Amino acid sequence: MIKARGFTLLEVLVALAVFATSATALIYSLGEATRAQAYMEHKTLAHWVAMNQLSLTRLQPKWPGIGITSGSEEMTGTEWHWTRNVSQTSDAKLRRVDLEVRLDAEDESPLVRLSAFVSQEPIKLAAPDAETKGRDNAYPGQNNDDDGTKDDDHDGGAGNPGEEEPGDGK
């Protein structure tokens, strides 16, 4: 008698069950990855909307009034809804700005919350003039010594000129 070779029905059913379980897990995993990517895309765009609104607040010629303002902005073909809450701080020349951005105006929790402070006196950034022309870091907030030279060692100009700093290896 010839012995039949092949798989039994039970072996085939077990293999099919293992394949179905692993395929289901793979499809679920891909769906979750797609949802996470879409969520992060929404969060990124909402953050950009919040940063735009903060920039517009800072660029206004008038200091923002205390209170809540709402509006919407279109970005990438999507309507984003923002809420700006301006409040007083302990410093009379500073105001706190809290921004929340939602995809739908009725959403309970925002995609992004952003807080910043706005000064009553605008920041003045001027183009380099004849005195500062040619220096690497001639803009406000950068570290120049009083004599107009760059402070390469970032020690605030401490030390004497020509004096070797420990570890300089000069």
Image (tube, rainbow, N blue to C red):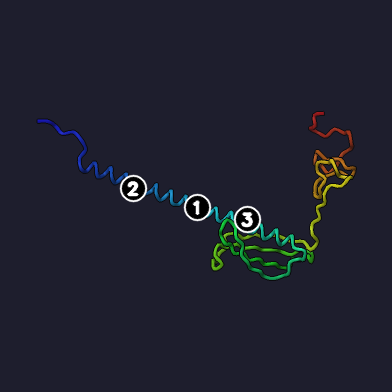
Residue shown at the point (86%, 40%) measured from the top left = 149
> In this figure, which residue is indicated by the disc labeled 1?
36
Q: Position of residue 81 (x, y in %)?
A: 59, 64
> In this figure, which residue is indicated by the disc labeled 3?
48
Q: Secondary structure at mark 3?
A: helix
Sequence-wise first label, 2 or 1: 2
Q: Which mark is residue 115?
A: none
Distance in Å between CA atoms under marks 2 and 1? 23 Å
Residue shown at the point (83%, 41%) measured from the top left = 135
**167 above or below 58?**
above
Query: Within 10 angstroms of label 3, few (less than 14), some, or many (20 or more) residues?
Result: some
Sequence-wise first label, 2 or 3: 2
Distance in Å between CA atoms under marks 2 and 3? 41 Å
Q: Quadrant of the N terminus?
A: top left
Sequence-wise first label, 3 or 1: 1
> In this figure, which residue is indicated by the disc labeled 2?
21
The three-letter code of the residue at mark 3 reads Trp
Q: Nearer the viewer, residue 46 or 141?
A: 46
Q: Nearer the viewer, residue 129 or 35?
A: 129
Distance in Å between CA atoms under marks 3 and 1? 18 Å
Q: Position of residue 138 (x, y in %)?
A: 83, 45
